[in-house]
């Protein structure tokens, strides 16, 4: 069982879960839903119940924080693989969660894209506002250490457990 502050993650309603936890999988294309950067980032914020002004603010802030083009209307398809992975991170964070779960986020990136993502993730983990980062790797190794402040109450047993716990259907 995966829990956050003593509450089973699988038992949380999606609208509650998105306010606490963001999830980034291996392949960014598996998580992209919208046609533009702004719409993609706004999705989780909308799901978390944020208002229009707050969503617009989060979109601008996350575009900047993740080093993405500052054009919310820019098409997602115009981004490189590394930019798409950073967009998925921005989207995962837009719900307002303080925990970011990563399932081999460097798996589909070239060395430059991986290095850029690591820089942005470290900045997020080290930020005063903070974001706890848990990186699941199936082989136990990586070309870079992504872990920031791993949440003490979030202890995954296996990488697929993270994905299953975060993506379990609403009860």
Image (cartoon, grey):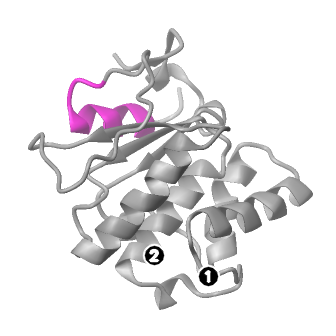
User: What kind of element bears circle 1?
Assistant: loop
User: Residue 59 appears at what percent x and percent y?
Assistant: 72, 64
Where are the magenta residues, as a range? 156-168
Q: Is residue 53 left or right of residue 110?
A: right
The reply to whether residue 32 is visible in this rendering is: no
Q: Of the two numbered discs 1 and 2 on the same chain, state the one appearing first in sequence.
A: 1
Which of the two residues, 40 or 152, is positioned nearer the viewer here? 152
The reply to whether residue 169 is visible in this rendering is: yes
Local crowd at mark 2 within 10 Å, few (<14), some, or many (≥20)? many
Residue at 53% in and 32% down: 170
Q: Which mark is residue 69?
A: 1
Residue at 33% in and 47% down: 146
In terms of image quadrants, where is residue 127? top right
Q: Residue furthest top?
A: 6
Whether the magenta-drawn stretch holds residue 87 is answered as no
Tally the marks: 2
Whether the magenta-drawn stretch holds residue 163 is answered as yes
User: Residue 8 appears at what percent x and percent y?
Assistant: 47, 16
User: Residue 167 appears at what percent x and percent y?
Assistant: 42, 40
Q: Residue furthest bottom?
A: 78
Residue at 69% in and 80% down: 70
Q: Is residue 119 left or right of residue 97?
A: left
User: What kind of element bears circle 2?
Assistant: helix
Residue indicated by mark 2:
83
Q: Quadrant of the N terminus?
A: top left
């Amino acid at each position: 069982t995966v829990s956050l502050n003593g509450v089973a993650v699988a038992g949380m309603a999606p609208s509650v879960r998105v306010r606490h936890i963001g999830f980034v999988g291996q392949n960014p294309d598996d998580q992209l839903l919208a046609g533009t950067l702004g719409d993609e980032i706004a999705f989780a914020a909308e799901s978390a119940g944020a208002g229009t002004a707050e969503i617009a603010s989060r979109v601008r802030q996350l575009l900047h924080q993740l080093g993405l083009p500052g054009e919310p209307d820019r098409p997602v398809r115009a981004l490189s693989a590394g930019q798409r992975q950073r967009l998925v991170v921005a989207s995962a964070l837009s719900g307002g969660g303080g925990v970011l779960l990563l399932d081999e986020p460097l798996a589909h990136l070239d060395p430059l894209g991986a290095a850029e993502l690591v820089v942005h993730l470290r900045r997020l983990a080290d930020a005063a506002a903070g974001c706890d980062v848990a990186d699941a790797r199936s082989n136990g190794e990586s070309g870079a250490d992504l872990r920031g402040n791993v949440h003490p109450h979030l202890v995954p047993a296996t990488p697929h457990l993270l994905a299953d716990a975060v993506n379990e259907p609403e009860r």
